[in-house]
Image (spheres, helix red, strand yellow):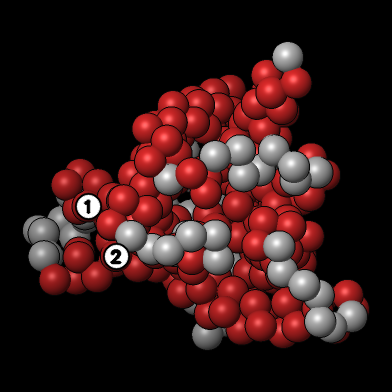
Amino acid sequence: MKNLINWKLFFILLAACVIASVLVLPYSLELTSAEIEISPVLMVVSAIVNNLLLFAIAIFLGLLFSKQTGMGLPIVQGFLNGENKSKELKSILPVSVCLGVAAGALIVLLSIPFNKAIPEFQNIEVSIPAWKALLASFYGGIAEEVLLRLFAVSLFLWVITKINKTKDGNSTVFEKWFSIVLAAVIFGLGHLPATAQITALTGIVVTRAIVLNGVAGVIFGWLYWKKGLESAIIAHFSADIVLHIITPLVVSLLMRA
C-alpha cells in the first residue's frame, strides 16, 4: 500500500482539487442565478466535504492506473523526487498554451451555429465578472483534468489492456485514442447538469455539449498521453481563459460599439 502510488503527489493533487472546487463557487452561482440560502462559510465547508472523498478516490485510482499504463505527471513527480525538471516544464509550455488557445478558439467558432439555434446560450457569460471566470478556470484546468484525464483515460486504457492483452503487455495506439475519445465524450456529458439549469436538455443541446467539450477533451487527452497531465492542465486553463474571459470581453466590446 505504501508504494502503490506517490503519496506526496496524491495529497498535492487532492489539495489542489478541493481548493479548485471552492474557487468555482462564485462562477457557478452567477451562471445559474441561484439564490444563496446558506452562509458563504457553510457553502465552502459543504463544497470541501462533498468533493473530498470524490477526488481522493479519483486521484488514488488515477495515479495507480496511470502508473501501470505509462502516463501521469512526469514533471511534478520528477520535482518531488529531487530532479530538476525546469527544462521539461519550459518545453511543454508553448505547445500546451497554443493548443489550449486553439481549443478555446475552435469551441467559440463551433458554438456559433449552436447558439443561433439555442437563444439561451447567446451572450450568457458577458455579464459574469472576469474575476469569477478566472477562479472557475482553475477548476477546469486542475479538477476536471484530474477527473477526466488522470482518472478516466487511465482507467479506460487499463481496462482495455487487461481485456485485449498484447504480447508485450503495452497498449496500442488505437486503444489510447479510444480511451481519450471516450473520456472526451463523458467530459461533454458531464456538463449537462449545469446546462439543465439554463435550458431544457433537447437533442441539439446534448449534441452541443458533446461536440464542443468533446473537441477540447480530445486535445487535452492527446497532451496527457504525449506530454503528461501537466500539459493538459495548462492547455485546459488556457482554453478556459479564452472561453470565459477573452471571448466575453470581446463580445461585450462589440455590443457597446
- On the image, the x and y values in percent for residue 70 come to 37, 54
- On the image, the x and y values in percent for residue 103 come to 47, 32
- On the image, the x and y values in percent for residue 218 come to 36, 43
Q: Is residue 91 visible?
A: no
- On the image, the x and y values in percent for residue 162 come to 19, 71
Which image quadrant for residue 163? bottom left
Where disc 2 sits, the SS reads helix
Where disc 1 sits, the SS reads helix
Q: Residues at badges 1 and 2 in contact (C-beta under 8 Å)?
A: yes
- Quadrant the C terminus occupies: top right
Instruction: Categorize mark 1 by other alpha carbons within 10 Å: few (<14), some (14-19), many (20+).
Output: some
| Residue in the foreground of this view, choosing between 68 and 142 | 142
| Residue in the foreground of this view, choosing between 64 and 3 | 64
Label 2, on which residue? Answer: 156
Q: Is residue 66 left or right of residue 86?
A: left
Residue 178, numbered label: 1
Q: Number of marks in the image?
A: 2
Instruction: Categorize mark 2 by other alpha carbons within 10 Å: few (<14), some (14-19), many (20+).
Output: many
Residue 207, numbered label: none
Image height check: is 170 above or below 119? below
Upstream in the sequence, badge 1 or badge 2? 2
Image height check: is 240 above or below 184? above
Q: Amino acid at mark 2?
A: Phe
Image height check: is 88 above or below 13? above
Q: Amino acid at mark 1?
A: Phe
Q: Residue sitting at 35 percent across and 68 percent down?
A: 155
For marks 1 and 2, give the CA distance. 8 Å
